[in-house]
Image (tube, rainbow, N blue to C red):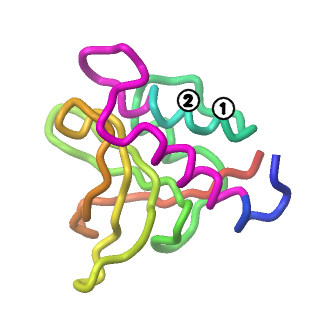
């Protein structure tokens, strides 16, 4: 496990990108948090152990805005969504990689107003 937050966060991004276009969880629905926990475990972190996206709002260390490698938590009708920030687009919106986006792992910009928590893994 990387000790520097920068090395740790870049390993989260590269691990998540390995699964672009696929569904490594084998689940048919509600798997964004399962994917997030899997990426965390594969990079030497403990996850939340929950399949609820909002479990990540109380995980790690809360930060004030998007950073590469931060976990972003957002609300949406019928639940929530969680992913990893990989950059910022030209309009200032975070680019996020997440599971269960169109039933696969995708990397895409997200309207910054939809994200209610950013956290960095601490373990």
Q: Which residue is mark 1?
A: 41
Judged left or right of residue 77, residue 63 is right
Residue 38 badge: 2
Q: Quadrant of residue 104?
A: top left
Residue drawn at x 42%, y 24% as measured from the top left: 24
Residue 63 x/y as whole percent = 57, 68
Q: Is residue 13 magenta?
A: yes
Residue drawn at x 69%, y 41% as measured from the top left: 43
In the rendered image of this protein, does residue 82 appear above or below residue 10?
above
Contact, mark 1 vs mark 2 (Cβ under 8 Å): yes
Q: Nearer the viewer, residue 88 or 112?
A: 88
In the rendered image of this protein, does residue 93 appear above or below residue 119?
below
Residue 20 x/y as whole percent = 36, 42
Q: Residues within 10 Å of mark 1 (few under 14, many from 20)?
A: few
Residue 73 x/y as whole percent = 39, 50
Judged left or right of residue 20, residue 84 is right
Residue projecting furthest to the right = 3
Q: Quadrant of residue 15?
A: top right
Q: Is residue 120 magenta?
A: no
SS of the residue at dot 1?
Answer: helix
Q: Quadrant of the C terminus?
A: top right
| Span of residues in magenta | 8-33
Q: Residues within 10 Å of mark 2 (few under 14, many from 20)?
A: some
Residue drawn at x 48%, y 42% as measured from the top left: 18
Q: Nearer the viewer, residue 102 or 57?
A: 102
Structural distance between the alpha carbons of marks 1 and 2 = 5 Å
Q: Quadrant of residue 98?
A: top left
Residue drawn at x 56%, y 60% as measured from the top left: 69
């Amino acid at each position: 496990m990387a000790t520097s937050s920068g090395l740790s966060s870049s390993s989260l991004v590269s691990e998540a990108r390995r699964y672009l276009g696929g569904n490594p969880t084998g689940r048919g629905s509600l798997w964004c948090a399962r994917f997030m926990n899997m990426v965390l475990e594969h990079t030497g972190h403990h996850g939340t152990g929950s399949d609820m996206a909002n479990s990540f709002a109380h995980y790690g260390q809360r930060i004030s805005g998007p950073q590469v490698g931060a976990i972003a938590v957002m609300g949406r009708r019928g639940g929530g969504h969680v992913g990893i920030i990989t950059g910022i687009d030209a309009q200032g919106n975070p680019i996020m990689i997440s599971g269960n986006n169109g039933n696969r792992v995708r990397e895409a910009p997200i309207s910054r107003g939809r994200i209610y928590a950013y956290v960095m893994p601490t373990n």
